[in-house]
Image (tube, coloured by chain):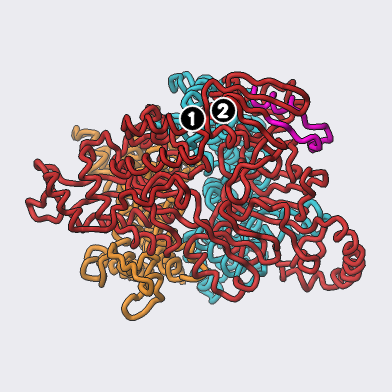
Amino acid sequence: MLNIKIRTNIFRRLLFFRKTVTFFLVLLLCLNGYCRESEEGSTDAYVFSGIADARILIPFFADDTTSSSICEFIYNGLTKIDKDLKIVPDLAESWKVEEEGLRITFYLRHDVVWHDGEPFTAGDVYFTFKKILDPGTGCPYISNYSGIKDIEIIDDHTIRFYYSQPYAPALLKFGMGIIPEHLFGKITDIRGSVYAVKPIGTGPYKFSIWKNAQYMVLAANPDYFEHMPRIKRYVYRVVPDQSVQFLELVSGDIDSMGLSPYQFLYRSNTPEFKDRIEKYRYLARSYTYIGYNLKDPLFKDKNVRRALSYAINKKEIIDAALLGLGDECTGPFFKDTVYYDDAAERYSYDMVKAALLLRQAGWSDVDNDGVLEKDGKKFVFRIVTNQGNQVREDVATIIQAQWAKIGVKVDIQVLAWSAFLDQFINKKNFQAVILGWSLPVDPDIYAVWHSDSSKEGGLNFVSYSNPEVDQLIELGRGKFDINERAKIYKRIHCLISEDVPYTFLFFPYSTIAVQKRFKGIEPAPAGIGYNFIDWYVKNDEVRYKF
Amino acid sequence: MNKRIIFGIVIIFVMTLSAVLAPFVARYDPLKMDLSEDARLEKPSREHFFGTDNLGRDVFSRMVYGARISLSVGFIAVFISLGMGIFLGGISGYYGGWIDSVIMRIVEIMYCFPTFFLIMMVITFLGPSIVNVMIVIGLTSWAGICRLVRAEFLSLRERDFVQAAKVQGVSNFRIIFRHILPNAMGPVYVSATLSVGGAILVESALSFLGLGIQIPEASWGSILTAGKVYIDYAWWLTLFPGLAILITVLSFNLMGEGLREVLDPKLRERK
Amino acid sequence: MKRYIAKRLLLIIPMLIGISFIMFTVMHLAPGDTASIKYGMNPEVSGSARANFDKMYDLDKPVLVQYGLWVKRLISLDFGSSLIDDQAVMAKITSRLPATLLLQIISLFIIFLIAVPIGVISAVKRNSFFDRIMTIFVFIGYATPSFWLALLLILFFGFKLGWLPISGMSPWYTAYLDSFDRTKDLIAHLVLPVVATAFGSLAALSRYSRSSVIEVMNENYVLTARAKGLSSSRIVTAHILKNALLSIITIMGLSLPALISGSFIFETIFAWPGMGRLGYEAIMNYDYPVVMGVGVIATFLTLIGIFLSDIAYAFVDPRIRVGGEK
């Protein structure tokens, strides 16, 4: 506990004597430790924090943010994403895609061992994907691999996958963490096994301690095949209240957390923050939108949805709800990629156009009460969003005011996530929603936009259906050539933009704070976490010396 | 007259009056946003007594309108629990026998239950709305009043005037509500007054967990909760709503205690 | 006495069944569907995974059948397993219970230790300066929104002054500390949650002890004792306190539900790894088995608390001890 700042000053006086004695001991140990530490090159601890605890540490069961991000420290996939979002080797040294994507062969690294010392082989890969593909396992990601027809072990370090049809996102999906066959082989209940809570992987960090609802500690893996991480421990702390979390960050007991736009811009101007904490921001791979239930008679008419979109002042929303920390969004792909079409219709704020479109659609304010009517029905509807997301709540409040100006009255309902999904989204029992999608690296949008995904429980809950888009989506996921795909997805972008099933609002910035003692952070398109094993703390700045 | 009652009544009266006359008391529309940069999170000033929130809305006006919500939760919830408590306590105490034991078992269950847990469950599962909050708080807080009413009835039902009414063939219903009840109301008034404060506190706690009124409308609890993330900077967003809740609940409690002292001669201080 | 204890103990069972049934019904009032919470809006999760899930947990059966199955398993203390992470509910609760008990018992202890003296002194020195100050404190304590107080405590003592830890029960590096530092850390982490938890009940209990002492003081035997010229400190200890304690014990038992209710909020604010937070999160996630488990255990604890205070009451009150019946 040597260098930890003791925050409990109350005890300080009582402990004065003890401390002077230990001080010399500490000094000795430090001098002693100094040499060793620089040899090891692995010091300190990085304390990250989130509002929810991890649930399960098996990569193919992990379906919440915390669990999957911790799994990434413990396990490796065959491929991974590098800082420029390119697919690069991880457990596989290289691969070959043959027969237009119907056959993919991976050549595995020879120098990989599991955290318990057993060697990693093609058998582990075979085992992992067989388990994923077994419907009895109940793996939520099974549809990502349903194109796999057969798996063949060529030798201990070569494995081949056969596809029934070409599937472009395949290589990306092989980023799924591999689990050890020698431990799970004989276990039938993988979910309930001890390795689901005390995992063994191949990754840069080994599992160490998990105190439910409090913290999890991972320790640097000295045998990691790239190199031993330079931060000795990775700690995840659960702090359920976001405002408390921020206080912990400023007082130094948390090393990193995501900030709200307000915290990022204003709260971080205080000296105690500026001196110790570095801020990073980059465009997040996600967008926020208003989705209209296309089955609702109110939104049947494309021109009405257009009018609503024109009536929204995206700039005002970004400035007010995100304090400017966001970029305008016009379609379902990530900005600045080859798939995003800058020429697509933007629906720039235009009240005149909005009013005109609504009038053409038959809506007018007959009784002069400020709300439009058509056939005796008022233009009133309810917009729902999930609780716990301040930005979305603010967006809802602002949109309500913006639409009021063209005579459209909206009620807002904010619900806890589970209730929100269950009562509104899955049953398609809503009129409009404010939600966001995160964007994987691959542009395939089958799950959200294909008409086949509009069944109950599917993610196309607005019931969007355009045969041309369907066809293009199917075409796109079968092509490996990036230029061909770019053309296809740009077209999709324009078509969706044209149909306005959503009003696309913005891409928010990821705004992250990290204590300044961490060096080696290089923001890139992939964010900052991609080179975590190269982050380090200078010896004289180390906070946790044990 | 009792000092506490006066203090309580004055504050409650002022609060209620400004809630009723909100449009005249508040200087701004509580929902009116001002999204320009220097209008947001403004410190308390002559223009904005309690400052502005992150969307540039006037906190004082929001709180004046919020008083409508917070106070009506208190009154309506207690009204419901009074209704249930008096009815069940009345028939329980009047009839006795198996009716009494069934009702008393239910009362015991309500007493032992961590009611807040039940309230959280119901609100989450039925969907948060201020109406649900009022009803659920009301439905879970009648046990105390029920016990009180029953105890009064037990002692009153043997009195002469009740017996006389029975002999005259007055219907049970009439005896319960016309003859006994008015005489049993003393302790009920006290308990009801105290419960109003309790209900306001429960509502604010629910708002704190995000289980209260829907945006952009606000109760005191939800203003406080929305301001929580700014607590280390925009202190006015948490301080004023918190104080408003404190003072209001305090007034109800003072009034209740005062009433108790007036109504219960045993407690009157002997000097 | 034995018969009395046995009778009180037996009463717990129908209460538990009654309460669990209420909760079960409430929970199924909701158009709930846990698969959607579990798999949520994850674009990568397929529909068949959701259907499988419902089957696995009997969620496709009627409510009464589910309740029957649930009670059957309850007999062997099996609450099933969490829909969220597949851990056994009982294991989840037992891992969280110590933290809650620690917080609650220390709070109760402190409440008792502070409230009773305050009450007694206020009663004996009625209308003194002390009494007036305490009355004000009590009324404020009653009226303070507890979560607001918790936030203010964190802000001042944790953040601004830095005297105490902001949240959590123990730091993550606790395993690397010696036992002295570990205990010290734990105590430091306990201070704010205990203050926040105890504050409201402290007011209630000191008020209550004041009035029960006053009541006893006005009883005839005390007046007699006083007339006989016994010193007032003797009267207080020998006669008044003993009798006043009776009613204080009862009210402590009855204040348990309030304390447990508070834990749902405080444990979330203070990041305390207790059962209250588990329950709150389970409600938010529609995690039925955990909600039921927490509800039953919380009720059970309350009942045990009330039972203990009944027994204590019986011990102090000879009328019950002799008669065996109330």
Q: Which residue is mark 1?
A: A478
Q: Position of residue A6 (x, y in %)?
A: 74, 67
> Label 1 is found on which chain of the structure?
A
N-term mark: 2 or 1? 2
The answer to whether the residue labelled 2 contacts the one labelled 1, judged by CB atoms less than 8 Å apart, is yes
- Residue C322: give its label: none
- Alpha carbon of mark 2 to alpha carbon of mark 1: how far? 8 Å
Q: Which residue is mark 2?
A: A101
Q: Check the image and report above or below for B78 versus C217.
A: above
The chain painted cyan is C
Q: Nearer the viewer, residue A192 or A373?
A: A373
Report crowding for label 1: few under 14, some 14 to 19, many 20 or more residues within 10 A (C-alpha). Answer: some
The chain painted orange is B
Q: Residue C154 appears in which quarter of the rendering?
A: bottom right
For the C terminus of chain A, the image quarter is: bottom right
> Label 2 is found on which chain of the structure?
A
Badge 1 element: loop
* Residue at 74 percent of width and 24 percent of height: A123
The kind of residue on which mark 2 rests is Gly
Badge 2 element: helix
The chain painted red is A
Q: Position of residue C287 (x, y in %)?
A: 52, 34
Query: Magenta segment range?
Result: A106-130
* Residue at 89 percent of width and 62 percent of height: A33
The kind of residue on which mark 1 rests is Gly
Query: Quick check: is A125 in the magenta stretch?
Result: yes
Farthest residue to the left: give it.
A366
Q: Nearer the viewer, residue A82 or C45?
A: A82
Residue B191 seen in this snapshot: no
Residue A451 seen in this snapshot: yes
